[in-house]
Image (cartoon, grey):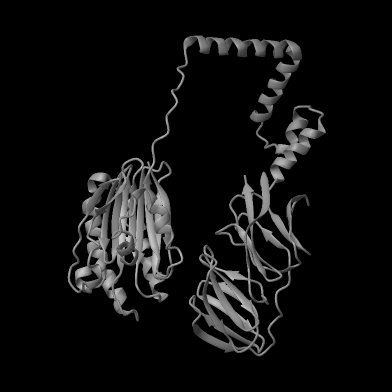
């Protein structure tokens, strides 16, 4: 099997992503790199990934792989060429690595300044296009995807990642330092990971993993079958004699009459029809019907200290978290929690709302602004009446619409220093969490990441809502 030993990408200039089958025998990897840092690159990277997902790659066979890769990027090159011409990027092309794994066999292509190597015993060997002298080559010679006004050169490479060996993908700025030295291949991973603090960093390290030994299945023999049947018949005979013939016959007769009846019977009425005088059974059935989920748990997923005061409830989308500090609006990446951009507005921010069209920010001077995902202003309006004040800590209701694991309804109750999860039907407390300081602001429920974002003192806290059903 192949496993990911290490990967890193420094947005917005780099991306490293993948998808794999559940058994791990099929996977595809995409790495992109660009020398500039404009946010337009994130849109282009998203379009590249979406093109691959919508291309029917999940149904691809090994025999079709090489031709499929060539056809995909031959067509997509022209789409990117037109896309880059609409941007303000200086270099209107992108470096890209794309690979498909079939068990341990890798089919891949390279464009631009992305290079590959593999470990062999204690040596590092070159794979694919040569990394030497790339820095003196023109854009056309680099073969950047989307750059040329002519058809792009596409060469598919094949490589077998053997057990206990590594396959490495690096941009030229790091490859020139790593590949040019006599670094021992056995220690190559920590050497590459030492560049984690470098801007425009990108790498992908795949490793061949030995298969686990499969235990032999015990064959079921006739003796096992006959012994099991004999034991079951003995247990049935003991139960039949212990309860008495009449009780068991009566139970089955009433059960048969119940299910043959034309009139529907509610679940809680079954004990009465069977003449079972046991209140505990009814309580158990009611609990099973009304229980929103078997297990609900609130837990601290991560927290990050902030060098300023948060003055409004956080907002979010699939990738970013948005915070307000007086008249400043800040955007952070969800995964890395790094600051993406900061915008200073004319007045203090009252509230932030994320919509499909972008952000809507309400200010104290009865003005609302429409902002794009990169913080640029798209529109502004004045309203005649005063805007409602900053949102308070109000209880929230979650149903199946917010999380498909919820069968009924649960309520999220903010407390002075935490949250409580309550079953809306019975009032039972399902889970609660206590924080170290007073809870100041609470976001809406992030159904994509199954969590809330809370503000405590100068810290933003991510509270995960685990639901098992």
Residue 256 image offset from top left, x and y in percent: 66, 24
* Number of numbered markers: 0
Q: Nearer the viewer, residue 127 or 122?
A: 122
Q: Quadrant of residue 288?
A: top right
Q: Residue furthest front?
A: 182
- Left or right, 113 with reference to 305: left
Residue 84 image offset from top left, x and y in percent: 31, 75
Please tell me whether residue 244 is drawn above or below residue 95 in the rendered image. above
Q: Quadrant of residue 367?
A: bottom right
Please report the residue visible at 75 percent of the width from the left and 30 percent of the height from the top: 273
Is residue 23 at least partly visible in the picture? Answer: yes
Quadrant, the C terminus: top right
Please tell me whether residue 393 is drawn above or below residue 100 in the rendered image. below
Q: Nearer the viewer, residue 275 or 279?
A: 279
Q: Quadrant of residue 291?
A: top right
Residue 147 image offset from top left, x and y in percent: 25, 73
Residue 206 image offset from top left, x and y in percent: 37, 50
Quadrant, the N terminus: top left
Please report the residue visible at 23 percent of the width from the left and 53 percent of the height from the top: 157
Please tell me whether residue 428 is drawn above or below residue 145 in the rendered image. above
Please report the residue visible at 57 percent of the width from the left and 76 percent of the height from the top: 330
- Left or right, 284 with reference to 360: right
Q: Nearer the viewer, residue 324 or 379?
A: 324
Q: Nearer the viewer, residue 422 or 70?
A: 70
Is residue 52 at least partly visible in the picture? Answer: no
């Amino acid at each position: 099997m192949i496993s990911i030993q290490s990967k890193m990408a420094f947005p917005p200039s780099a991306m490293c992503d993948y998808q794999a089958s559940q058994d791990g025998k099929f996977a595809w990897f995409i790495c992109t790199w660009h020398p500039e840092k404009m946010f337009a690159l994130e849109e282009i990277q998203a379009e590249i990934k979406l093109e691959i997902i919508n291309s029917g790659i999940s149904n691809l066979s090994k025999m079709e792989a090489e031709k499929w890769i060539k056809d995909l990027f031959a067509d997509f090159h022209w789409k990117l060429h037109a896309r880059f011409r609409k941007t303000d990027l200086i270099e209107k092309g992108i470096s890209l690595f794309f690979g498909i794994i079939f068990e341990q066999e890798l089919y891949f292509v390279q464009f631009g300044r992305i290079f590959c190597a593999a470990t062999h015993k204690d040596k590092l060997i070159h794979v694919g296009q040569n990394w030497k002298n790339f820095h003196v080559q023109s854009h056309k010679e680099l073969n950047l995807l989307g750059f040329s006004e002519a058809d792009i050169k596409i060469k598919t490479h094949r490589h077998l990642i053997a057990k206990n060996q590594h396959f490495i993908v690096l941009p030229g700025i790091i490859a020139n330092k790593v590949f040019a030295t006599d670094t021992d291949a056995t220690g190559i991973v920590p050497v590459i990971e030492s560049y984690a603090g470098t801007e425009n960093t990108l790498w992908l390290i795949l490793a061949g993993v030995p298969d686990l030994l499969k235990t032999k299945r015990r064959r079921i023999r006739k003796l096992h079958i006959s012994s099991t049947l004999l034991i079951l018949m003995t247990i049935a005979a003991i139960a039949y004699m212990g309860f008495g013939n009449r009780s068991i016959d009566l139970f089955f007769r009433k059960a048969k009459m119940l299910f043959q009846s034309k009139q529907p019977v509610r679940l809680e009425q079954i004990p009465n029809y069977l003449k079972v005088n046991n209140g505990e059974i009814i309580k158990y059935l009611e609990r099973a019907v009304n229980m929103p989920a078997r297990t609900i748990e609130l837990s601290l997923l991560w927290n990050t200290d902030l060098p300023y005061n948060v003055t409004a409830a956080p907002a979010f989308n699939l990738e970013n978290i948005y915070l307000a500090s007086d008249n400043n609006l800040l955007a952070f990446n969800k995964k890395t929690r790094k600051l993406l951009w900061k915008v200073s507005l004319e007045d203090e921010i009252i509230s932030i709302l994320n919509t499909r069209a972008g952000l809507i920010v309400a200010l104290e001077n009865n003005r609302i602004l429409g902002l794009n995902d990169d913080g640029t202003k798209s529109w502004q309006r004045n309203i005649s009446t005063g805007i409602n004040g900053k949102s308070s800590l109000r209880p929230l209701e979650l149903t199946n619409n917010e999380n498909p694991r919820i069968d009924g309804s649960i309520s999220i109750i903010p407390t002075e220093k935490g949250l409580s999860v309550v079953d809306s039907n019975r009032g039972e407390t399902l889970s609660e969490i206590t924080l170290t300081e007073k809870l100041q602001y609470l976001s809406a429920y992030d159904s994509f990441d199954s969590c809330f974002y809370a503000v405590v003192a100068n810290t933003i806290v991510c509270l995960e809502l685990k639901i098992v059903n």
